[in-house]
Image: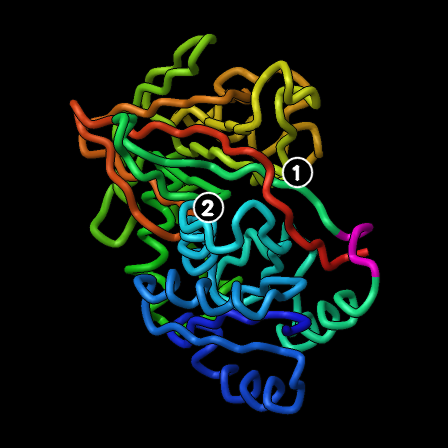
Amino acid sequence: MALVALLSNPNSTGNKSLLPQMRCFCASHPDIFHYEVEQASQIGQALESIAMVKPKVLIINGGDGTVQAALTELYHGGHFADAPPPVAVLPNGKTNLIALDLGAEGDPIAALERIIEMARHDMSPHIVSRELIALSDGSENARPVLGMFLGGAGLADAILYCRTKIYPLGLPNFISHILAAFAVFFSTIFGLRASFLPKKGTPLRVSFVRNNELQGSFSVLIVTTLEKLLLGGRSASNDSKINGRLKFLAVDERPWSMLRALAASIGGKLGKNHIDGVHIKQGDIIRIDGNNSSVILDGEIFTAYDESPIVLRSTPPVPFLKIAA
């Protein structure tokens, strides 16, 4: 038996400098079962071993891509039968969107100490439910990949641009993200095109089962099950039983649409009122069609082709541990 299990990816950005401290911390806390993986293919074996020690909490120490791989194996592997432990995520990696949604920010070791203290007591006040995004090509025998945040259209291009053009500069993450956001914004607003700027978005068709369809080029496309949409947007309705669990936000690739969305986001009004060129919806099944159009689910790239769409479905709720009070 172990109080908590810690699954670490030594290759994630944050762990390259932090992992020695993390190993030292775990060595001094025998109630932590620490398992390190070098690649995603080892996560199934890791969870099989972790299930044997029956931890109260499964802690993931890596970036969003590590979390995505672990959630996929946790969902499909059946290692914990029908009673998986709540999942906690340390603030690590470059984006940390999932960790931030669960209240984890700042020093990862301090967050780990907080989780251990919570695990020693009744955790029920801190356990929250989150549905996951199941991504597949829609075929009957497909094995979906699970995640919580998907970026597409111009947003996916911006993420790839940040990875290939900005991160190699060695700047702090928050500065890199600001530079990438400005590059996307100004290239769209002023129609600038150059090899050192993000490329123009590819047209997409987005279909909502039992609802309607959107078609066009978008500067931002987001599907998430996180509590908040990116840019501070609110979902279409608080009644997920009516509109579905997948929260969707898209902004047309037109200057005025982007400016309106930015102004509404700064003013805290995004999603409260109708804005031309800004689409906020919810659904249980979302289909994305495009010609060689990429989306990024928690750090992993997937591509929609003419006859091979990307289909997103929501899963039943999964327990997570929210670190913030």
> Which x, y percent locates residue 256?
48, 24
Q: Earlier in the sequence, mark 2 or mark 1?
A: 2
Q: How many marks?
A: 2
**What residue appears at the point 56 percent right and 83 percent down from the top-left corner?**
22
| The N terminus: image quadrant | bottom right
> Which x, y percent locates residue 134?
42, 36
Q: Residues within 10 Å of mark 1 (few under 14, many from 20)?
A: few
Q: Residues within 10 Å of mark 2 (few under 14, many from 20)?
A: many
State left or right for residue 206 relative to residue 1: left
> Which x, y percent locates residue 77?
41, 51
Which residue carries the number 1 mark?
266
- First to last magenta residue range: 122-126
State left or right for residue 41 relative to residue 105: left
Q: CA distance from mark 2 to mark 1?
A: 37 Å
State left or right for residue 168 relative to residue 277: left
Viewer-proximal residue, 290 or 126? 126
Mark 2 or mark 1, which is nearer to you?
A: 2
Question: Marks 2 and 1: CB-CB under 8 Å?
Answer: no
Picture layout, residue 240 above or below residue 59? above
Picture layout, residue 197 above or below residue 142? below
Regarding mark 2 in the picture, which secondary structure is present there?
A: helix
Please tell me whether the stretch drawn in magenta is mainly helix, strand or loop. Answer: helix
> Which x, y percent locates residue 27?
59, 90
State left or right for residue 116 relative to residue 190: right
**What residue appears at the point 62 percent right and 55 percent down from the top-left corner?**
85
Regarding mark 1 in the picture, which secondary structure is present there?
A: helix
Viewer-proximal residue, 298 or 190? 298
Identity, as a three-letter code, of the amino acid under mark 1:
Ile
**What residue appears at the point 43 percent right and 71 percent down from the top-left corner?**
9
Q: Which mark is residue 75?
A: 2
Picture layout, residue 81 above or below residue 106? above
Residue 58 colored magenta? no
